[in-house]
Image (tube, coloured by chain):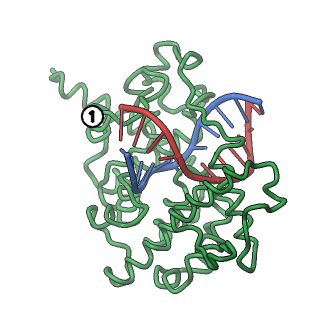
Chain colours: A green, B red, C blue
Amino acid sequence: MPTSQEHIFGLDARRVALVLGWFEASARDLPWRQPDCSAWGVLVSEVMLQQTPVARVLPAWEEWMKRWPTPGHLAAASQADAVRAWGRLGYPRRAKRLWECARVLVDRHGGEVPADADTLLSLPGVGDYTASAVRAFAFGERAVVLDTNVRRVLARVWGGEPLPATSVRAGERQLAERVTPLDPASAAAWAAASMELGALICTARAPRCEECPVASSCAWFAGGRQGLEEAPRRTQAWHGTDRQVRGRILALLREADAPLIVEGRTALADVEPGQVESCLESLLADGLVALVDAERGLVALA
DNA sequence: AAGACGGGGTA
DNA sequence: TACCCAGTCTT
């Protein structure tokens, strides 16, 4: 007679096994998943994948790794070249942080990506998710990887809810820890597999439950997939926002081969002068843009 | 805990 | 048009 604990564990294991089995047959062939991909390659991919879909990261990653195959190569380049190579991936502060990260790796870690969690977390642009992902995918360590995809899978399959909460709750963290296999290789496989399931099948608004390997064991599916339509959307304004204007200013500077005066440019004619000014100020404060000639207001990529 | 921070593919 | 995405960092 199994104890209730064993029953719970059995259900966890069954669900995990279903996802792992599906992943073996359905995993996408991504370059940073190749066994010979360096830890640096994995780190670069993870930073690029922060809030940017795989399809858009793919070409940028290939180009980046060809140009800067090691931290040392990137550290020897200029920050401006890194931001330029980042192109339109979005959130250009990530490019700056990745460049800074390369410098730290060279200055303090022998030009190598560390495997230690605390050291990884100390790096610019590396938070909880990225540190865990690098440990799991680059070093094969047991790490609890909790990204938006994994959170959604846990919320549905285990929690019976349509979507996870806005921020990670303690109970969610505990569940993720409990569900992660103890064996390091299996834990890494689970991380990749659960992320893949969330990205391809258990998607946010149009889940493909008829193709899902765990539908038969999914609490949300069993409950009739209730609540998804009513769930609040987390939309963010875009047109006319500071983010858009910052992006437009940065695009001008990326394409310019000489310092220029941003204010009054025809390309920004539809933006209020005050907003151009404030956005330029914030870009300067972020260290993405540098004032080359204060007298004339000439700026360039930092 | 909440807000700032890009940009484009997809429905 | 609206929505979403392999998050991080700062109030």
- For the view shown, which residue lies furthest in the right direction? A266
Residue A228 drawn at (x, y percent): 55, 20
Q: Can I make out residue A140 in this image?
A: yes
Task: Read off the chain for label 1.
Answer: A
Residue A98 drawn at (x, y percent): 49, 69
In screen coordinates, is A259 left or right of A92?
Answer: right
Dividing the image into 4 quarters, which one contains the C terminus of chain A?
A: bottom right
In screen coordinates, is A132 left or right of A91?
Answer: left
Dividing the image into 4 quarters, which one contains the N terminus of chain A?
A: top left
Residue drawn where x is 58% and y is 56% of the image = A91
Q: Which residue in the structure is indicated by mark 1? A: A170
- For the view shown, which residue lies furthest in the front direction? A295
Which type of secondary structure does the marked residue at label 1 adopt?
A: helix
Residue drawn where x is 15% and y is 23% of the image = A3
Residue A148 drawn at (x, y percent): 47, 40
Question: Tag count in the figure?
Answer: 1
Residue drawn where x is 46% and y is 79% of the image = A71
Residue drawn where x is 52% and y is 13% of the image = A224
Q: Amino acid at mark 1?
A: Ala
Which of the pair A113/A236 is nearer the observer?
Answer: A236
Residue A18 drawn at (x, y percent): 44, 36
Q: Is residue A103 above or below residue A149?
A: below
Local crowd size for mark 1, using a 10 Å CA cut-off: few (<14), some (14–19), many (≥20): few
Which of the pair A107/A156 is nearer the observer?
Answer: A107
